[in-house]
Structures are given as structure tokens and as C-alpha cells.
Amino acid sequence: MDVARLKSEITSDPAGLGYSGKTDQQVADLMNAVTREVDRGLVAAHVLFRRFNQAEYVAKITDLTDGVRNRHLLEVLLGMGEVDINDANVEALLTTVFNGGGSATIRNLIGHAAGAFPGDDLRKKKVSRAGQLGFGTVLPGHVTEARSA
């Protein structure tokens, strides 16, 4: 645990969580509560693929006009191993292949589909303040140590 960074977080409270006047346990609880949403960043290609609407995917790669292009673009994307789902180029590629917001696949990726992934935006992940700062789990003893440092 980076005690100096933790002390700075507790004393300055930049996220406005209200650490002042709280016990060490209460501060730890505030920091560990999953209340934030951040960009997910890298996603395993197989996770991305599971969000594809399979009927739509097959139609896009077998289309007589654009099927070869679509298949090549998706092979490149899925062959990366990990994909930065928030990257503008990745978004543009997926939008090109799956024809934008009307696509079930695009709705699956951003969590607006009724069914398998409702409300789950693959581009975001939920974290605690401690997780956002890279602390892992903050224990009351960590808070005690930071306050006395």
C-alpha cells in the first residue's frame, strides 16, 4: 500500500466521498464501495466475439458485396488477442461492419440490447475508488497508518 498516496487521498478527498470525520472503518468502506465507472480498456477478443449477434455476424461475412472485406476486418480485430474497446478505430471498424446503432451486435456491445447483455456496456467497468487508484482493497489498518503518517 502506498501510504503517502492514501494519506493524500484521505486528506484532500478529491472525489468528494466525505472522508472527514469518519472512522477508519468508514473510510475504508467508502473507498472499497463499487460506485464508479471507468473505461474498460483492453478486452479479450473472445469476450468481444461473444457479444456478436451470431445471425448478424454470419450475414455480414457471407454477404456477396462486402463479405470478404467484413471477414478480413473481423479476422484482424479478433486476431489481436486483446482489443481496446474504447479506441475510435475499433469503434469505426465495428460500426462499418455492423452498420451502426441499428445493429443487434452494436447494441450488445454497448448494453442497449434486450436479452443477453442488458445494461452492460462492454466499454465500461465498475470499480471502487480504491480500485480506481490502484490500491486494491483498503483495510481500516491502512487508513490508520495513512492518517498517522
Image (cartoon, helix red, strand yellow):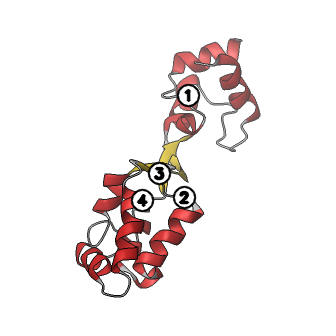
Q: CA gap, disc 2 to disc 1?
A: 24 Å
Residue 112 visible, this angle: no
Q: Indicate which disc, 4 or 2, sits on the residue closer to the N terminus.
A: 4
**Quarter of the image where one finds residue 117:** bottom left
- Residue for point 54% across, 58% down: 86
**Label located before the other in sequence (1 or 4):** 4
Tell me which numbered mark, 3 or 1, is placed earlier along the sequence.
Answer: 3
Mark number displayed over residue 86: 2
Residue located beneath label 3 in the image: 125
| Nearer-N-terminus badge (3/4) | 4
Closer mark to the observer between disc 3 and disc 2: 2
Secondary structure found at label 2:
loop
Give me the C-alpha separation between circle 4 and circle 2: 13 Å
What's the residue type where badge 1 is placed?
A: Phe
Q: Secondary structure at mark 3?
A: strand
Element type where label 1 sits in the image: loop
Sequence-first disc among 3 and 2: 2
Question: Which of the two residues, 127 or 113, is positioned nearer the viewer here?
Answer: 113
Q: Is residue 126 left or right of residue 114?
A: right
The residue that label 4 is drawn on is: 77
Q: Secondary structure at mark 4?
A: helix
Q: Residue at x 38, y 65 (%)?
A: 74
Q: Which residue is mark 1?
A: 135
- Badge 2, how many Cα within 10 Å: few under 14, some, many 20+? some
Q: Amino acid at mark 2?
A: Asn
Question: Residue 91, position in %: x, y?
Answer: 52, 67
Q: 18 left or right of 24?
A: right
Q: Residue furthest bottom?
A: 65
Work out how far the residue at label 1 is from the one at label 4, CA to CA, in angstroms.
32 Å
- Which quadrant, please, contains the C terminus? top right
For residue 52, what is the image quadrant?
bottom left
